[in-house]
C-alpha cells in the first residue's frame, strides 16, 4: 500500500476537478441553480446544489454526457487570487458562495466549509471553460487529463443534504460522482460496490443464521444465534490462547462499577455523553461499564507490586455498554453493547519498547493466521499544543518505542501528528479487506494519566515507589465489529476452523440416513462440527443449500459409499474430490483445522 496521502494523490486532483466539471454541466442544465460546495471524498466527489425541482435520471444522463464534452474540450484550470470584494462580484448570483466568502474573510471557514480560523485577505478561484469556483485546489492542469470513460455520476442516487450540515438551514441536493484514471478502475470499483451490497454482514448474518436483533430486546443489542455463538466462541477461545501464549493473565470483572470508580478514572462525568445514566441500588450508584480499564486497575492495586512483577498483563473479553445515537447503529459494526478483546499492561518506562513489539507481533500473528494480509498501522503522536498530560521526555520515549516497534517488525505504518489521546501516544490498526475497503480495528494506547489518578505504584530496585505506565490494547476492537468485518471479507465463507458447521452430511436417499448419522457421530467424536441434511430436497438441491450456507465440506453418501465404507468429499467451491475412507477425511480435516489452513475448502 502506498504511503502517499490521498490529498497529495493524482486521484484526489482528478476528483476535485471532476466536481467542477459536474457543477459546470449542472449550471447549464439548471441555469437558476445555486451551487454550494463540492469536495473530493473517498473514491469520488460530490457537489451540493439548491435546485428549482428534483433532479431526474434524464437530468443526470444529460449532465454526464455534457461532462464528457467538457472534458473533451481540453480546458485549462486557471487559478487566480482575488480580493474578497472581487470574489463577491464574481459570485454575486450565488448566495452560498457569498456566505462562504464572508466567512473566509472573517476567518471562520475554508473553501470546503470546514471550520478553521484564519482570516483571508485573498481568495483563490479556479476557472475552467465557462465555470468559476471558489476553491483552493489542487486540480489537474487541463480537462484532457480527466478520463471521460472513467467516471460516473449515476452509480449512486442523489441524496438530501443540509447546507453546512445544519438541519435548520436550506436542504440541498447532493449529487455523487466517482472518478478514476482508467475505465478498468471504474469497472472494478463498480463491481466492488455491488459485491459490498451482496456481502453486507447484516444480510449474510441473517441468511447464515449467525445473529439477530429484536426491538423488544433493544436497539443495537445483537443476539447471537447458535451458529454465530459457535463462531464467536471459537474465535474468542483462540484469541485467549494466543494471549496466554504471549504472557497475558486472564481476569474476569463485572458489567457494572460504582460511580466513584469512574469519577476516579475521569470517565464520569467527562464521557457522560456516551454512557447510560447511573443506576441507584440501595445507597450505591452504579454505571453500566463503559470501559474495562478501572476494573483491571483495581486488580493491579489489590497487591503490592515489585519491579520484578512487571510487566503485569491483564486480559479480559470484557463487555461494555456505550450510548450510540440510534441513527448511527449499524448491524454488528455499530452496537450499544459489545465485547472488547481488552488487555491492560502495567510496565516500567524501560519496558515500553519490548511490550509494544510483542503487541505488534501478537497482532501480526492473528492477522496472518486469519489470512488477512493487507493491514497497516497509524501512529498517533502529540502536536505542539498543551492538551496532554505527563512528562515530555516520557512521551517522546513512548512515541519512539511505538515507531521503532513497527519498524523492527516490518509493520507498514504512518505517523499522524496530533492524533494522540491527551494521556499518551497510540497505535491504531487499519485493515483493508478484499473489496479494498479500509476498516479501523483496534488500538494500542500508552497512558500516563490513569496510573496517576489511581496512584499506582511498584517498588523499584532502590526500594523507591515508582509509577508504572499503562498500555491499553484491544488490537481487534470488539468481537462484534471484528466478526462483522470478517463476514464481509470472507463473504461468509470462513476458514474451516472457524466455520460454525464444518461438515454437512448429504445422504443421497432416505436409505442412507443411518449410515450418514453414524459417520456424523464419529466426526463429532473427533471434534468436527457436523450435521446431516435429512431434508426432502434432491441431492443437487442439498449441495446447493450447503454451498449457500458456506459449509466448507460436504460428505455425500450413497450406495457405493455404504458398500465400500467411504465418503465422497465435495468442497463449497464445487470441487469434487471423490471417495475416500472416513479415516482419511478425518485426518485431512484435522490437519487443516489445526494449522488454520485455507486449503481444500
Ligand atoms: Zn476544486
Ligand atoms: Zn483501557
Image (cartoon, rainbow, N blue to C red):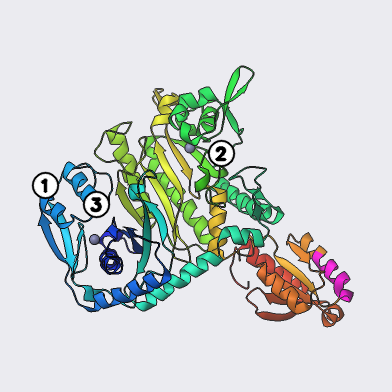
The C terminus lies in which quarter of the figure?
Answer: bottom right
Q: Is residue 263 visible?
A: yes
Q: Position of residue 326 (x, y in %)?
A: 53, 44
* Magenta-drawn segment: 510-520
User: How far apart are labels 2 and 1 at the CA level?
Assistant: 50 Å
Mark 3: secondary structure? helix
Q: Point out which mark residue 121 bears.
A: 1
293 to the left or right of 46 = right
**Nearest the eye: 600 or 545:** 545
Residue designated by label 3: 95
Q: Nearer the viewer, mark 3 or mark 1?
A: 3
Q: Secondary structure at mark 2?
A: strand
**Residue count near mark 3 (Cα–Cα under 10 Å), binned few <14, some 14–19, many ≥20:** some
Query: Does 583 sit above or below residue 42?
Result: below
* Left-right relation of 350 to 337: left
Q: Position of residue 548 (x, y in %)?
A: 66, 70
Name the chief secondary structure element in magenta.
Answer: helix
Q: Are marks 2 and 1 in contact (CB under 8 Å)?
A: no
Left or right of 585? Residue 418 is left
Q: Find residue 400 and report its horizontal and vertical position in percent.
A: 31, 45
Q: How much space separates mark 2 and mark 3, taking CA atoms? A: 47 Å
Rendering quarter of residue 28: bottom left
Q: Residue at x 18, y 73 (%)?
A: 75
For marks 2 and 3, the one nearer the N-term is 3
Task: Give the mark nearest the N terminus, 2 or 1.
Answer: 1
Q: Residues within 10 Å of mark 1 (few under 14, many from 20)?
A: some
Q: Quarter containing ligand 1?
A: bottom left
Q: Is residue 44 left or right of residue 552?
A: left
Residue 320: assigned label:
2
Percent across and percent down for residue 596 are 60, 63
Amino acid at each position: 500500500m502506498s504511503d502517499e496521502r490521498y490529498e497529495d494523490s493524482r486521484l484526489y486532483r482528478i476528483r476535485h476537478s471532476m466536481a467542477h466539471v459536474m457543477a459546470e454541466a449542472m449550471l447549464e442544465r439548471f441555469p437558476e441553480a445555486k451551487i454550494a460546495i463540492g469536495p473530493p471524498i473517498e473514491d469520488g466527489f460530490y457537489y451540493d446544489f439548491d435546485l428549482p425541482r428534483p433532479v431526474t435520471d434524464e437530468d443526470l444522463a444529460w449532465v454526464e454526457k455534457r461532462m464528457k464534452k467538457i472534458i473533451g474540450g481540453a480546458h485549462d484550470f486557471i487559478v487566480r487570487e482575488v480580493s474578497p470584494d472581487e470574489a463577491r462580484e464574481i459570485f454575486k448570483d450565488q448566495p452560498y458562495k457569498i456566505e462562504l466568502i464572508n466567512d473566509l474573510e472573517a476567518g471562520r471557514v475554508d473553501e470546503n466549509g470546514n471550520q478553521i480560523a484564519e482570516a483571508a485577505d485573498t481568495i483563490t478561484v479556479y476557472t475552467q471553460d465557462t465555470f468559476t469556483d471558489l476553491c483552493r485546489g489542487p486540480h489537474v492542469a487541463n480537462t484532457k487529463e480527466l478520463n471521460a470513460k472513467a467516471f460516473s455520476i449515476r452509480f449512486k442516487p442523489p441524496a438530501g443534504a443540509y447546507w453546512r450540515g445544519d438541519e435548520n438551514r436550506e436542504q440541498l441536493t447532493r449529487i455523487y460522482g466517482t472518478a478514476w484514471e482508467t475505465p478498468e478502475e471504474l469497472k472494478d470499483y463498480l463491481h466492488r460496490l455491488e459485491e459490498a451490497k451482496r456481502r453486507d454482514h447484516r444480510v449474510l448474518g441473517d441468511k447464515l443464521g449467525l445473529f439477530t436483533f429484536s426491538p423488544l430486546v433493544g436497539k443495537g443489542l445483537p443476539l447471537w444465534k447458535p451458529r454465530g455463538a459457535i463462531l464467536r466462541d471459537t474465535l474468542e477461545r483462540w484469541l485467549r490462547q494466543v494471549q496466554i501464549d504471549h504472557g497475558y493473565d486472564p481476569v474476569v470483572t463485572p458489567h457494572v462499577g460504582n460511580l466513584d470508580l469512574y469519577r476516579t478514572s475521569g470517565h464520569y462525568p467527562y464521557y457522560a455523553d456516551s454512557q447510560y445514566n447511573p443506576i441507584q441500588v440501595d445507597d450505591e450508584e452504579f454505571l453500566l461499564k463503559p470501559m474495562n480499564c478501572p476494573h483491571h486497575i483495581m486488580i493491579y492495586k489489590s497487591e503490592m507490586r515489585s519491579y520484578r512483577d512487571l510487566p503485569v498483563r491483564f486480559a479480559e473479553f470484557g463487555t461494555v455498554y456505550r450510548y450510540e445515537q440510534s441513527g448511527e447503529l449499524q448491524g454488528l459494526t455499530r452496537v450499544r453493547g459489545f465485547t472488547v478483546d481488552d488487555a491492560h499492561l502495567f510496565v516500567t518506562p524501560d519496558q515500553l519498547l519490548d511490550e509494544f513489539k510483542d503487541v505488534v507481533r501478537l497482532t501480526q500473528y492473528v492477522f496472518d493466521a486469519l489470512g488477512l494480509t493487507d493491514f497497516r498501522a497509524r501512529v498517533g503522536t502529540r502536536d505542539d499544543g498543551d492538551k496532554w498530560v505527563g512528562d515530555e521526555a516520557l512521551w517522546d520515549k513512548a512515541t519512539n518505542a511505538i515507531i521503532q516497534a513497527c519498524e523492527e517488525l516490518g509493520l507498514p505504518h504512518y505517523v499522524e501528528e496530533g492524533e494522540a489521546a491527551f494521556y499518551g501516544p497510540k497505535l491504531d490498526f487499519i485493515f483493508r479487506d478484499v473489496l479494498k475497503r479500509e476498516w479501523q480495528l483496534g488500538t494500542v494506547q500508552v497512558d500516563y494519566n490513569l496510573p496517576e489518578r489511581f496512584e499506582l505504584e511498584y517498588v523499584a530496585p532502590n526500594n523507591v515507589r515508582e509509577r508504572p505506565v499503562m498500555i491499553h490494547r484491544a488490537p481487534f476492537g470488539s468481537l462484534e465489529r471484528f466478526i462483522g468485518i470478517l463476514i464481509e471479507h470472507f463473504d461468509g465463507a470462513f476458514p474451516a476452523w472457524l466455520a460454525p458447521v464444518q461438515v454437512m452430511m448429504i445422504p443421497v436417499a432416505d436409505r442412507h440416513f443411518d449410515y450418514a448419522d453414524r459417520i456424523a457421530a464419529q466426526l463429532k467424536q473427533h471434534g468436527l462440527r457436523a450435521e446431516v441434511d435429512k431434508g426432502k430436497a434432491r441431492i443437487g438441491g442439498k449441495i446447493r443449500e450447503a454451498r449457500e450456507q458456506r459449509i466448507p465440506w460436504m460428505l455425500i453418501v450413497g450406495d457405493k459409499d455404504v458398500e465400500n465404507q467411504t465418503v465422497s468429499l465435495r468442497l463449497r467451491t464445487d470441487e469434487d474430490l471423490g471417495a475416500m475412507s472416513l479415516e482419511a477425511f478425518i485426518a485431512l480435516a484435522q490437519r487443516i483445522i489445526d494449522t488454520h489452513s485455507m486449503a481444500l475448502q
